Image (tube, helix red, strand yellow):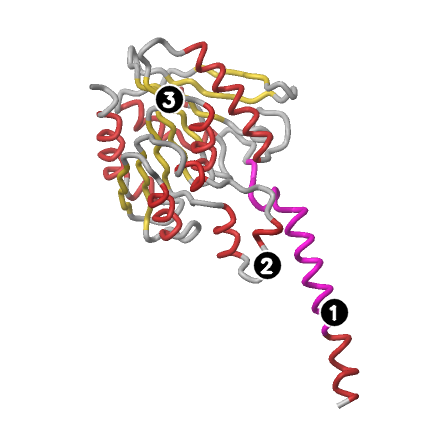
Amino acid sequence: MRKVKTFLLPVIVIVAGVYLVVCIAAFVMQRQLIYHPYRQILTTPAAIGLEYHELRLQSPDGVEFVVWSIPAGLSLVNVVYFHGNAENISNSTGTYKLLHELGVNVYAFEYRGYTNCTGTPSEGGITTDLKTFSEYLSRSLPSGAKTIVLGRSLGGAFAAKFAMLYPVDGIILESTFNRMVDVGKMGFPYLPISFLLRERHDSEEILRSLDKPVLVIHSRDDEVIPFELGRRLFDAAIGEKSFVEIEGSHNSGFEISEATLRTAYRDFFGRFRR
């Protein structure tokens, strides 16, 4: 028995040490795990025939970030769009084209640390930029304008945050999650995620406090953000809400379900044109 104990003790110490190192790495490197800045501009709205303007804004901490403005004539309906974590604003021209065809102005928001922006991405830093952009919209949009936020994947978390900072009229959350802690627990079930996580991204808590129309869109085929987390997000919303199920994986849902998305967007925008 003494020999067994003598053998087990160093094994336990080694396993505990490795576990502690993994926990420390997860705590220190979580921003690198969450944000994957894609720095190359693949294309622009102009390449698909859309007029656009690049806005360069500066936050109080000196960080400069970019917003693409894509006008749609005299429309008073505006969509602020937030892309996913491993993209940049140039990856979503198909979405901009669809939104333009539906007659809404688009503001595509780029995150600090991503293409043509300074700084390093973080929840707190990007929230500072959201405040700066909300002040810009308050000065720029005409009386009677309607504003809708649309966030895809990680962009859903920033869409929800923006809805807390600016008086939006509606919220669209597509292929996104309810809370980052739940994503972390599913991906790393043996780590104390609730204790380690600094980047909280709690959209569920925000929706529980906002009485705004909400449209949640998700696919059962989503292999990155489980369908269940989209349903939890929908359940948390306290305002008028609807859920649309699409088909396709996390990255192919837009292409595969474009017709479904077109109908869902058109119907949601329609209530703000009355």
Q: Position of residue 18 (x, y in %)?
A: 70, 63
For disc 3, the neighbor class at 10 Å (few under 14, some 14 to 19, many from 20) is many
Secondary structure beneath label 2: loop
Whichever of callouts 3 and 1 sits on the residue coming sooner in the sequence is 1
Q: CA distance from mark 3 to mark 1?
A: 54 Å
Q: Are marks 3 and 2 in contact (CB under 8 Å)?
A: no
Nearer the camera: disc 2 or disc 1: 2
Q: Quadrant of residue 205?
A: top left
In the picture, measured across the screen, residue 128 lies left or right of residue 149, that is right
The numbered dot on residue 106 is 3
In the picture, measured across the screen, residue 145 lies left or right of residue 140, that is left
Q: Residue at x 45, y 20 (%)?
A: 68
Nearer the camera: disc 3 or disc 1: 1
Q: Amino acid at mark 2?
A: Leu
Q: Residue at x 39, y 47 (%)?
A: 250
Nearer-the-camera pick, 226 or 258: 226
For disc 2, the neighbor class at 10 Å (few under 14, some 14 to 19, many from 20) is some
Per the rendered image, the range of residues in magenta is: 12-37
Identify the residue position indicated by label 2 in the image.
Answer: 191
Is residue 6 a member of the stretch shown in magenta? Answer: no
Whichever of callouts 3 and 2 sits on the residue coming sooner in the sequence is 3
